[in-house]
Each structure stands twice: as structure tokens, then as C-alpha cells.
């Protein structure tokens, strides 16, 4: 198993839910009051015959009108068309924006050869367009042109690829456990988004069920520590991949 971090940088988000690029070397936090600052890290995993994308970032482009996500995949030594599976934790915009791309004035799936794997309840809620956290136009493109596969509840998608309906960050959030028999990694989406949330116990106000999400983080930390799982932290400021160990009734995360 090979793991690649496809970092898309840092952003500020205010009440309008717009994601504005933020460069700590150039920008001042005080100029963006009442904002949440986040970091975005989709992941690429080579596992057996599959090239897997775990969530898809914001879908922003570089100065050459190319998706950052596509460029990062090329930097890892692959072509975007080689991606076979896109395993989604949920469909909030900062995780789903890169699922589509504009080409010649028309939006198309960013990964035409890939199978998009989404929890059915999450898809139904997202495409209903009842929350500004979701961009319905993205899902309409996918519905028209992408290879969609919906899963329900928890189960095994393919040998070594297990999904678990978790429902802490949003009602139909899911997490992924990947195990090729030699290496294994856990992707917790926004229920284990950064190492700090594992180290510090707290209830996040942006979670659908904050108490449940907090309890899930501790549960995932214990499983990762006991089983030697690498954890992939989608919103990590740095060190987006780490191993976990329990110590003195808490957790310590070691970068990989």
C-alpha cells in the first residue's frame, strides 16, 4: 500500500461558507474575523490493482486552468484517468468540490474511469439541496455522467475495503478501513479530521452529533493504537498521516 497526501492548502471559512485561500506567510488572521481556518488534504492510496481517492477537496484550479487535485496526482506519479475508486466519507463541499471539473464551459466528472462510492442516505440528502454545505450542481453532474455506486449501512465494499456508517459529523457520514494484508490505514473523514481532535477531547459545534463524534474519535483512536493502523487526517495543518498509541489515558500521534 502506498499513501500520498494531495494537500490543497489552507482556507478561511466565514458564515457565508465560502472557502477563501489563506497563506499564513502572507495573510493576517485578524483580517478575517469570525472565520474558521481549515486545511484540506485529499488522499491517494495505491492498493493492489486499485488507485483510490479518499475525498476530493475543493476543486480549485491552478494558473493553467488545471485542477490542483489532478496536478497533485501527476506529481505522485499517476494520471487522473488511472483512478479506479473514489471512496467518499461525505459530500460537504470541501470534500466533494473536486469530483467535477469544468472543461470548455461544461462540467464533467473529474475522474471519468472511476467508480464513485457514496453512502446512499448522504447522496439523497445532498442532492435534495436543502443545505448550503452541499452544492447540488455537483451531484447533478455526477448523476448524469459518473459511475455511481451507493452503499448502505456498514459492510465490505471489496476485499480489504470496509466502510462503516458513523453518523457523527453528519447523519450519513461514513469512515473507511483499508487493509491489503501488509499495511492498513483508516480514513475518518470529518470524524477524525486532525490529530489534535484525537489528543484533546471536546465536542465540536459544527458536528451533527457532537457527543457521538467525540466518542467515535476515542473509539477510532483505541482501534488504531491496538491494531497499528495509519490514520489519514483530512484537515491536518501538517503531518496528515500518523500512527497512534495510547499513553497515560490519552493518545499520542506520531507522523509517518
Image (cartoon, rainbow, N blue to C red):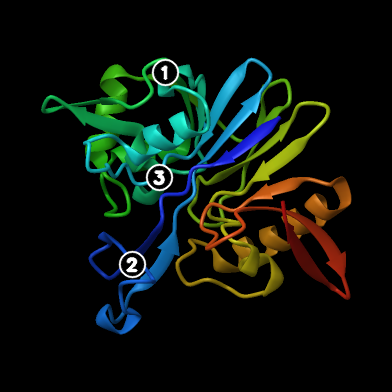
Q: Residue furthest left?
A: 105
Which element is circle 2 on? strand
Give residue 98's quadrant in the image: top left
- What is the x, y in percent for residue 225? 83, 54
Q: Which residue is mark 3?
A: 57
Q: Residue at x 51, y 19 (%)?
A: 84
In the image, which disc is placed on residue 110?
none
Q: Residue at x 45, y 67 (%)?
A: 206
Q: Earlier in the sequence, mark 1 or mark 3?
A: 3
Near-viewer residue (162 or 12)? 12
Residue 4 in the image: above or below residue 241: above
Q: Earlier in the sequence, mark 1 or mark 2?
A: 2
Tell me how far mark 2 sits from mark 3, CA to CA: 14 Å
Q: Earlier in the sequence, mark 2 or mark 3?
A: 2
Left or right: 170, with 227 as reference point:
left
- For residue 119, say whether it is visible: no
Tell me how far mark 1 sits from mark 2, CA to CA: 31 Å
Q: Which residue is mark 1?
A: 81
Q: Which residue is mark 2?
A: 12
Which element is circle 3 on? loop
Between tags 1 and 3, which lies in front?
1
- For residue 166, say whether it is visible: yes
Badge count: 3
Amino acid at each position: 500500500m502506498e499513501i500520498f497526501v494531495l494537500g490543497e492548502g489552507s482556507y478561511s471559512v466565514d458564515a457565508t461558507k465560502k472557502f477563501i485561500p489563506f497563506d499564513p506567510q502572507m495573510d493576517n488572521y485578524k483580517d478575517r474575523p469570525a472565520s474558521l481556518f481549515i486545511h484540506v488534504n485529499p488522499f491517494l492510496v495505491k492498493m493492489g490493482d486499485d488507485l483510490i481517492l479518499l475525498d476530493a477537496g475543493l476543486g480549485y484550479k491552478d494558473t493553467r486552468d488545471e485542477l490542483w487535485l489532478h496536478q497533485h496526482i501527476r506529481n505522485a506519479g499517476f494520471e487522473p484517468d488511472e483512478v479506479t475508486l473514489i471512496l467518499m466519507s461525505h459530500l460537504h463541499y470541501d470534500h466533494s468540490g473536486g469530483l467535477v471539473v469544468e472543461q470548455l464551459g461544461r462540467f464533467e466528472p473529474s475522474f471519468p474511469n472511476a467508480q464513485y462510492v457514496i453512502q446512499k442516505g448522504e447522496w439523497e440528502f445532498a442532492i435534495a439541496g436543502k443545505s448550503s454545505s452541499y452544492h447540488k450542481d455537483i451531484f447533478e453532474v455526477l448523476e448524469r455522467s459518473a459511475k455511481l455506486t451507493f452503499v448502505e449501512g456498514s459492510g465490505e465494499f471489496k476485499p480489504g475495503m470496509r466502510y462503516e456508517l458513523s453518523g457523527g459529523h453528519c447523519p450519513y457520514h461514513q469512515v473507511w478501513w483499508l487493509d491489503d494484508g501488509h499495511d492498513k490505514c483508516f480514513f475518518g473523514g470529518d470524524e477524525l479530521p486532525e490529530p489534535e481532535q484525537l489528543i484533546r477531547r471536546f465536542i465540536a459545534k459544527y458536528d451533527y452529533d457532537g457527543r457521538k463524534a467525540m466518542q467515535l474519535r476515542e473509539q477510532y483512536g483505541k482501534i488504531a493504537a491496538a491494531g497499528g493502523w495509519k490514520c489519514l487526517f483530512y484537515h491536518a495543518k501538517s503531518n496528515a498521516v500518523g500512527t497512534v498509541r495510547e499513553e497515560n489515558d490519552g493518545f499520542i500521534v506520531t507522523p509517518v
